[in-house]
C-alpha cells in the first residue's frame, strides 16, 4: 500500500481524542504514523451521525470557519469563505505519481513516487500543530455495491470534515464495509499555510494513496471526489474491468413508457448539474414526461452479467456551481440549496441570506462579496465568485431517482458527450457505432470555464471530460473504452451535444435548460427504435420533424445543426495535434475513425 509517512519525532504523551477508534488495526496503525508526522494537538474520529454534523457545524461557526445564515429563510445553512488564492482546482499542482512517466501519460503532470513522498513529508512535518486531525472514514458507492470503495481521509480542516459528511457515506457505514481488511484508500490532507507555491495534490495509483497539501478547495481537499472517485478510480477501473467517469446519471420517462437511463460527460461548469436535475418544461410535463436524477458529477459503470452497461453514483451529495442557478435554470437545485447546505464563496446580504449572480429576484443595492468586502452594483466586480459552490446531501433533491439506492446501478441506454463550443460543433449528433462514439468522446474540446484555474474561454481538448481526472495514460484509457464493445452485448447508443453554439452576434442559437428535453426525447426514442434520423458526415442527426420544436425558431435550430466543411477541416487538424501526443499508445481504431470522417467531409 505504499510507504508509510515517517517522522523523526514520536509523540510521548497521549493525544486528546474524541470519538471511538475502529477495531481495524491497519487503520489505527496508519493513523498513528500520520499523527507522528503531522503532530496535531487533538484527534477526532468521525462517526457520520447527524448529531456530530450539528456539533461540528457549531464548532466551525465558533472558530470563524463558517458563518450561520438566516435560520428563517435558509435553515441549517452556512457560508464558508476560502482563501482568495484557493478557489478552484489547481491542475498545475496536481500530480500522478507512477513508477514511470509513461504510465501517467502525456496529459498528466508526473512526479516519481519517491520524490513526491519526500516532498510532501517535508511539508507535513508539524503541519497540524495547534490543529485537530479529523479522521474521516468514507464509502464511495452504496453498501453491497460491486464497485463500492472505502477511503479514510485525515484532514486538519473542519470544513473538509463537514463537507465529506455531506458528500459521502461517512463514518461507521464505511468502517463496517471495511471490516478488518487493509483495502482502503489512504488520503492525507493538510491545508498547511495555503500557499499556492507550496501546493500539491498527489495521487499514487499503485499504492491506492492520495496526499494533498496546501489547499482547502473542494476538488483539491475533498479527497473522495475527484481524487478517489476519478483519478484513483479510473486506474482501478482499468485494472478491474470497469469505468470511472466524470458523468451525470439521469432517468427520462416518456408518457406511459419505461424509464430510459442515460449518462453524460461535460466539462465542469458546462451545464452538467442543470442537465442532471432538468425539470420538464410545462408543455412536456402536461404530456406526462418525467425526469429523475441519480447523480450529477460521477458515474462508475461496469458490464453486467446481462451484457448491458450499468451505472451507479458513488457520491452521497452535491458540490455544484452556484452562479446562474435559479428557478428557470435549475429549480431542483434551488430547492436543494434552501436548507442544510454549505455555501462556499457566495455573497452575503444584510439579512443573512446568500446571493449570487443569476439568483432569482432583483440585484441587491449592497452586500458583502465573497471575500467579505462591501459590494454594490457599481463595484465593477462579481459579488459571488464565478466558481462559488453549494454542498448538500443528495436526498434533498426532490427529483432524486429511486434507482439511486440500487447497489447494482441503473441500466445505461445512452451515453452523451457534451462541450461548450460557440462554433463548428452541431447541437446534436448520434455516433454510427461504438468505435465512432468513443472517437467523438476522445476528440471533444470545450471552452474553459472558472471551475479550473487559468485563462477562461480558450478551447481545450478534454477527452470524455476526463483530461484533469484520468489517473493513467489516456491512450490506454481510450483502448479501455474500445474494449467494452466486446464486453457488452447490449451497447448503449452514444451521442454528442453542444447547447452553446452562437450566431454572428454571439447569442445562443438554442434556448437550453428545460428545452434540452426536446433533444433528450429524441435520444430516448432512438434508444427505443421509435424515431428515424438522417445520415450526415458527422453521424446521425434528427430531422426537424423528428423533434418537438413547438415554439422554437426552426431556422435557428437548423443553423445550430449546420456543418461547415472548412471549419471541420481545421477541427481535424486540431484533433491530430491531440492524437500525436499519445504516440504509440494512440489506438489505431481512432486514427482510422478520423480518416473516415475526413473522407466523408
Image (cartoon, helix red, strand yellow):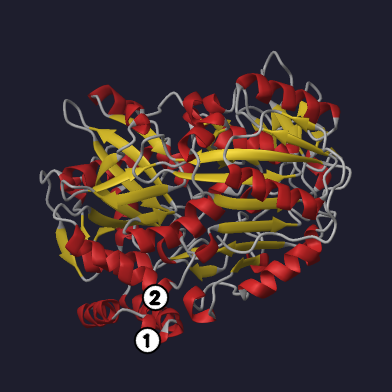
Q: Is residue 478 left or right of residue 166?
A: left
Quick check: marks 2 and 1 in contact, CB under 8 Å? yes
At x 40%, y 62%, the residue is 464
Q: Is residue 164 left or right of residue 271?
A: right
Distance of label 2 from label 1 (alpha carbons): 8 Å
Q: Picture quarter containing residue 24?
A: top right
Q: Is residue 420 left or right of residue 81?
A: left
As rendered, which of 178 and 476 lies closer to the eye?
Answer: 178
Task: Note whether 412 is above or below 591 in the view shown.
Answer: above
As rendered, which of 8 and 462 lies closer to the eye?
Answer: 8
Secondary structure of residue under mark 2? helix
Q: Position of residue 86 (x, y in %)?
A: 74, 53
Q: Is any atom of residue 40 visible in this view? A: yes
As rendered, which of 398 and 133 lies closer to the eye?
Answer: 133
At x 28%, y 56%, the residue is 495
Q: Residues within 10 Å of mark 1 (few under 14, many from 20)?
A: few
Q: Position of residue 83 (x, y in %)?
A: 80, 49
Q: Picture quarter containing residue 296?
A: top left
Q: Is any atom of residue 358 visible in this view? A: no
At x 84%, y 48%, the residue is 11
At x 66%, y 17%, the residue is 75
Q: Position of residue 371 (x, y in %)?
A: 82, 43
| Mark identifier at residue 198 | none
Q: Position of residue 253 (x, y in %)?
A: 24, 32
Question: In the rendered image, which residue does mark 2 sit on?
Answer: 475
Question: In the rendered image, which residue does mark 1 sit on?
Answer: 584
Secondary structure of residue under mark 1? helix
Amino acid at each position: 500500500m505504499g510507504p508509510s509517512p515517517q517522522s523523526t519525532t514520536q509523540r510521548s504523551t497521549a493525544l486528546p481524542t474524541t470519538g471511538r477508534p475502529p477495531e481495524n488495526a491497519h487503520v489505527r496503525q496508519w493513523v498513528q504514523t500520520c499523527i507522528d508526522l503531522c503532530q496535531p494537538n487533538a484527534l477526532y474520529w468521525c462517526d457520520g451521525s447527524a448529531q456530530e454534523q450539528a456539533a461540528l457545524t457549531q464548532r466551525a461557526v465558533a472558530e470563524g470557519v463558517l458563518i450561520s445564515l438566516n435560520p428563517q429563510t435558509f435553515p441549517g445553512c452556512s457560508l464558508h469563505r476560502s482563501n482568495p488564492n484557493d478557489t478552484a482546482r489547481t491542475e498545475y499542482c496536481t500530480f500522478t505519481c507512477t513508477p514511470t512517466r509513461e504510465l501517467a501519460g502525456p496529459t498528466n503532470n508526473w512526479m516519481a513516487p519517491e520524490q513526491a513522498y519526500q516532498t510532501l513529508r517535508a511539508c507535513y512535518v508539524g503541519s497540524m500543530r495547534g490543529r485537530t486531525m479529523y479522521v474521516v472514514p468514507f464509502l464511495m458507492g452504496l453498501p453491497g455495491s460491486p464497485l463500492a470503495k472505502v477511503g479514510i481521509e485525515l484532514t486538519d480542516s473542519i470544513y473538509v470534515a463537514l463537507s465529506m459528511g455531506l458528500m459521502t457515506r461517512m463514518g461507521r457505514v464505511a468502517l463496517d464495509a471495511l471490516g478488518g481488511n487493509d483495502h482502503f484508500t489512504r488520503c492525507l490532507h493538510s491545508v498547511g499555510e495555503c500557499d499556492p507555491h507550496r501546493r500539491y495534490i498527489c495521487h499514487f495509483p499503485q499504492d491506492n494513496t492520495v496526499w494533498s497539501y496546501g489547499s482547502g478547495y473542494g476538488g483539491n481537499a475533498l479527497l473522495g471526489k475527484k481524487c478517489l472517485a476519478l483519478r484513483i478510480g479510473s486506474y482501478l477501473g482499468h485494472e478491474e474491468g470497469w469505468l470511472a467517469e466524470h458523468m451525470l446519471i439521469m432517468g427520462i420517462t416518456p408518457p406511459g413508457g419505461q424509464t430510459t437511463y442515460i449518462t453524460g460527460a461535460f466539462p465542469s461548469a458546462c451545464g452538467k448539474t442543470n442537465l442532471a436535475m432538468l425539470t420538464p418544461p410545462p408543455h412536456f410535463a402536461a404530456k406526462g414526461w418525467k425526469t429523475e436524477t441519480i447523480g450529477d458529477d460521477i458515474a462508475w459503470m461496469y458490464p453486467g452479467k446481462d451484457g448491458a452497461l450499468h451505472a451507479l453514483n458513488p457520491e452521497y451529495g452535491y458540490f455544484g456551481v452556484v452562479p446562474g442557478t435559479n428557478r428557470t435554470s435549475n429549480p431542483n437545485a434551488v430547492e436543494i440549496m434552501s436548507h442544510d447546505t454549505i455555501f462556499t464563496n457566495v455573497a452575503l446580504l444584510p439579512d443573512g441570506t446568500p446571493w449570487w449572480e443569476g439568483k432569482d429576484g432583483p440585484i441587491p443595492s449592497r452586500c458583502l462579496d465573497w471575500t467579505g468586502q462591501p459590494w454594490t452594483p457599481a463595484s465593477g466586480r462579481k459579488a459571488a465568485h464565478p466558481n462559488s459552490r453549494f454542498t448538500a446531501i443528495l436526498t434533498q433533491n426532490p427529483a432524486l431517482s429511486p434507482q439511486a439506492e440500487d447497489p447494482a446501478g441503473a441500466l445505461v441506454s445512452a451515453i452523451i458527450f457534451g462541450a461548450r463550443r460557440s462554433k463548428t460543433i452541431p447541437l446534436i449528433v448520434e455516433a454510427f457505432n461504438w468505435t465512432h462514439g468513443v472517437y467523438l468522446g476522445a476528440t471533444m474540446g470545450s471552452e474553459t470555464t472558472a471551475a479550473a484555474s487559468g485563462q477562461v474561454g480558450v478551447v481545450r481538448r478534454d477527452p470524455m471530460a476526463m483530461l484533469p481526472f484520468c489517473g493513467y495514460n489516456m491512450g490506454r484509457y481510450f483502448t479501455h473504452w474500445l474494449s467494452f464493445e466486446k464486453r457488452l452485448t447490449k451497447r448503449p447508443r452514444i451521442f454528442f451535444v453542444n447547447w452553446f453554439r452562437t450566431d454572428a452576434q454571439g447569442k445562443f442559437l438554442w434556448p437550453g435548460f428545460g428545452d434540452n428535453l426536446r433533444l433528450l426525447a429524441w435520444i430516448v426514442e432512438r434508444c427505443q427504435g421509435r424515431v428515424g434520423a438522417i445520415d450526415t458526415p458527422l453521424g446521425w442527426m434528427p430531422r426537424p420533424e423528428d423533434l418537438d420544436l413547438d415554439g422554437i425558431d426552426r431556422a435557428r435550430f437548423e443553423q445550430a445543426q449546420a456543418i461547415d466543411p472548412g471549419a471541420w477541416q481545421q477541427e481535424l487538424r486540431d484533433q491530430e495535434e491531440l492524437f500525436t501526443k499519445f504516440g504509440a499508445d494512440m489506438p489505431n481504431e481512432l486514427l482510422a475513425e478520423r480518416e473516415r470522417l475526413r473522407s466523408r467531409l
